[in-house]
Image (tube, rainbow, N blue to C red):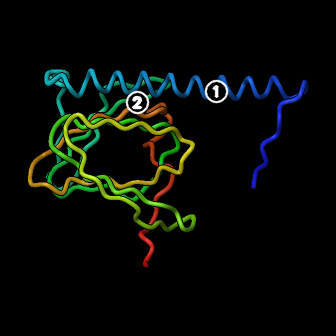
């Protein structure tokens, strides 16, 4: 258990740094939400970008990437699903079209998790998470129609193959 320590003359700079870090995180998430809102509510923003599709699977299509972040349009064919996973970086996403089911989980060990929530996410839904999690979830297209989502990850796509930090197995009740 971590105790909260009252700032002293020695620790005051650390407390200010912690406050600044939280402010930067809030500013980043606010900006990411704003960009997602502008994108998911603009039906033409993906026009001209060739999106790969695979029957029975989801496909990640890089829209933008640099050393700070990567932005992916993910096309979800009916029946496609991710593993149960957490991220090593910030993860913000918005639903452009169709609907996705998001299942949230709580870890019971380093390898297993239990389901805590199941929610249908429709067009215009936006969520943002910092890597301070765990933010364990699984996304799936349980409908008979294609879905498209836009994901903003805080990682350089040239250095990491994906944003997934850890995958989990479903714990038996």
Residue beneath the point at 37% across and 38% down: 127
Check disc 1 and report its element: helix, strand or loop. Answer: helix
Task: Specify the label residue 1 is tagged with.
Answer: none
Q: Circle 2 — which element?
A: strand
- Which of the 4 quarters of the picture holds residue 116? bottom left
Quadrant including the C terminus: bottom left
Q: Which of 69 and 131 is in front in this view?
A: 131
- Residue appearing at x 52%, y 63% in the figure: 107
The residue that appears at 83% across and 35% down in the rendered structure is 6
In the displayed structure, would residue 84 be above or below residue 11?
A: below
The spot of residue 104 in percent (x, y) is 39, 56
Q: In this view, does 77 lie above or below 48?
A: below
Q: Is residue 23 rendered to the left or right of residue 44?
A: right
Image quadrant in which you'd find residue 105: bottom left
At x 34% / y 57%, what residue is drawn? Answer: 103
Q: Which residue occupies the extreme front position in the image?
A: 6
Quadrant where the N terminus sits is bottom right
Q: What separation in Å lies between label 2 and label 1 (alpha carbons)?
A: 21 Å
Instruction: Name the residue that disc number 1 marks.
Output: 21
Say whether marks 2 and 1 touch (CB < 8 Å). no
**Where in the figure is residue 144, as x and y percent of width and height?**
9, 54
Q: Nearer the viewer, residue 144 or 155?
A: 144
Image height check: is 40 above or below 112? above
Q: Mark 2 points at which residue?
A: 70
Instruction: Give residue 147's position: percent from left, percent from top.
Output: 17, 43
- Picture quadrant where residue 137 is located: bottom left
Q: Which residue lies furthest to the left in this view?
A: 144
120 horizontally vs 158: left or right: left
Q: Residues within 10 Å of mark 2 (few under 14, many from 20)?
A: many
Say which label, 2 or 1, has the lower sequence index: 1
Q: Nearer the viewer, mark 2 or mark 1?
A: 1
Q: Where is residue 49 in the image (x, y as percent from the top left)?
A: 19, 25
């Amino acid at each position: 258990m971590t105790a909260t320590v009252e700032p002293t003359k020695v620790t005051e700079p650390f407390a200010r740094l912690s406050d600044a870090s939280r402010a930067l995180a809030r500013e980043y998430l606010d900006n990411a939400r704003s960009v997602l809102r502008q994108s998911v509510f603009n039906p033409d923003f993906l026009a001209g970008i060739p999106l790969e599709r695979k029957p029975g699977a989801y496909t990640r299509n890089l829209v933008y990437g640099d050393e700070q972040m990567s932005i992916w349009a993910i096309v979800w064919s009916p029946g496609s699903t991710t593993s149960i996973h957490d991220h090593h970086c910030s993860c913000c996403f918005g639903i452009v079209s169709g609907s996705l089911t998001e299942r949230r989980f709580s870890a019971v060990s380093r390898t297993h998790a239990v389901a805590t929530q199941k929610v249908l996410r429709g067009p215009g839904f936006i969520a943002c998470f910092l890597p301070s999690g765990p933010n364990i979830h699984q996304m799936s297209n349980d409908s008979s129609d294609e879905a498209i989502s836009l994901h903003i990850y805080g990682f350089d796509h040239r250095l990491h193959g994906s944003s997934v930090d850890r995958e989990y197995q479903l714990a038996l009740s």
